[in-house]
Image: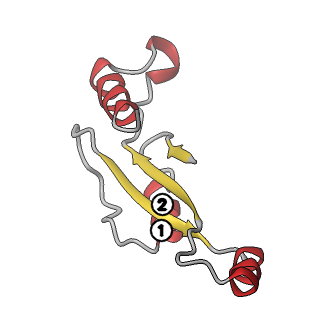
Amino acid sequence: MRLGIIGLPQSGKTTIFNALTRGNQPTTISGTRIDIHTAVVDVPDERVDRLSKMFNPKKTIYAKVTYADIAGLDGSAGKSGISGTLLNQLARWMASFT
């Protein structure tokens, strides 16, 4: 599963990203730079653990979630759409999964 966190600047996107991924990305203003930070997190599941103990597989694989912390939109995003730079970054991020 891939989830992107997107929103206005200084709205807490990176704080949520850090909480979900146990990361430590800085939460300062990035200026005009468009960055997408990603992290992959295992999803713990007691049912998988139980099945793994029952059937003793060679390897146990948990579900994974890929989170993306996407740079903040500027205040005019609702009026004029998303900037071309941000669209390019999003397209590049999505293409990395195909």
User: Could you tell me how many numbered marks the image carries?
Assistant: 2
Using the rendered view, name the quadrant where residue 74 is placed: top left
Residue positioned 36% across, 23% down in the render: 87
Amino acid type at circle 2 is: Phe
Near-viewer residue (29 or 51): 51
Report the coloring of the rendering: secondary structure
* Percent x, y of residue 17: 48, 60
* Residue located farthest toward the bottom when viewing the structure as drawn: 53
Front-lying residue, 71 or 22: 22
User: In terms of secondary structure, where does tag 1 sit?
Assistant: helix
Residue located 27% across and 38% down the image? 34
Residue at 43% x, 58% y: name it: 14
At label 1, counting other C-alpha atoms closer than 10 Å, the crowd grade (few under 14, some 14-19, many 20 or more) is some
Q: Quadrant of residue 63?
A: bottom right
Q: Is residue 17 above or below residue 34?
A: below
- Is 67 located above or below residue 86 in the figure? below
Q: Nearer the viewer, residue 1 or 18?
A: 1
Disc 2 is placed on an element classified as helix
Q: Position of residue 98 (x, y in %)?
A: 40, 32
Q: Which residue is mark 2?
A: 17
